[in-house]
Image (spheres, rainbow, N blue to C red):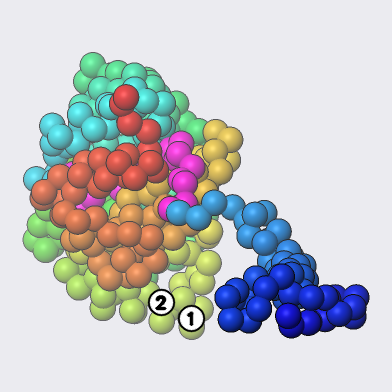
Amino acid sequence: MTFCKCARGQSLPSLCSDSDVPPSTCPAKLHKQGASLLHMVRLLLPSIAMALAAPPSGPAKHTLKKLVAFDLDGTLLNPEHRLTQPTLDKLRELDGLGVSIVFATGRSAPAVYEHVAALGIQSTLPCVLYNGAVCYAFPQPCDSAKDAAARKEELFSLGIDLADAAEVCAFAAERGLLVQYYVGDHIYVRPTCDEHRDLVRRYHELTGASHTSVEEYPLTESPAKMLLMTDDPDGVLSTVREAQASGALPSGLASIRGSPPFFVEMLGQGVYKGSGLAKLCERRGVAMADVVAFGDGENDVEFVRDAGLGVAMKNGRDAVKQVAGRVTARTNAEDGVAHELSMLQAEGVLPQRN
């Protein structure tokens, strides 16, 4: 018979010889192993407690977004500047599920009336226009563009200071640039050559908006925005910003490259599409974190960046893609917005039908 030491130091006989029972079954050895295991458990307890307290692993759950805002040209509209049937169907579906639909565009009010009338949703449609300078609410549905114009309600307006507007007009005249001067539903122009008249024609074809030709701009009325019409928007934008830096133009004015690219846009201080959307959301009690924003152009950068989820179009400019949370898989010629909205529904970002 062999002997071994127990945990108390006493000599204990083993129950059997080393030859017929493995050493691991010896009572004293088992007692010692149990003590070691208990010590290890005590060491691991803090880690176990932390693991139990941690949130479940796996994909993060999305909070459903409450509002989706859309740029128009290059985004929601196709290359023919129309709302396609798949786009209309998807917007109506989301409206029926309680998601707020918002248009956010550089266009003037007359340039959106036909799209407001075509939408055909049941909830009031807010439109952030003039790249954030003015916001109207349009009751829905509307029978026609004329009905949309008659029933709109102004939510806010932030025009260009009259002195600043006069300086922009003088700057443009010195360089032979045509100005589009926006007051209410009117676009005032003062074309002095065939090039100017061609630019007016092209803008009308793009937006459907009509112009009022004048001998002098109405500098007693504050414009919502001003456009410097040009086929060299990058060059003119560079000249504008140099003039702002030197004091030749008011430095507080926002200057943006147009989309489509045949104008440079001038807005009042602190006005841009993103600030207009934020102002609208504040009025409606919606946090920007609960907003999805779709855009394609440089005037959409802050608009897309500041939303809870910013989506750049596949056909968009690099500047907006760089700040976006995602890029659509399809272009505006391929119903890219409607497709992406369906993807967001499948991912649990937007509600979907049961």
Per the rendering, the mark at residue 241 is 2
Residue 248 appears in the rendering: no
Query: Mark 1 falls on what kind of element?
Result: helix
Is residue 339 shown left or right of residue 288? left
- Amino acid type at circle 2 is Arg
Residue 329 pos. (x, y %): 19, 56
21 or 203, nearer to the observer: 21
For the point 28% across and 70% down, the residue is: 318
Residue 215 among magenta residues: no
For the point 20% across and 29% down, the residue is: 89
- Amino acid type at circle 1 is Ala
For the point 46% across and 76% down, the residue is: 244
218 or 100, nearer to the observer: 100
Establish if 155 lies above or below 320: above
Residue 330 appears in the rendering: yes
Residues at discs 1 and 2 in contact (Cβ within 8 Å): yes
Determine the CA span between mark 1 and mark 2: 6 Å
Q: Which residues are magenta?
A: 59-77
67 or 277, nearer to the observer: 67
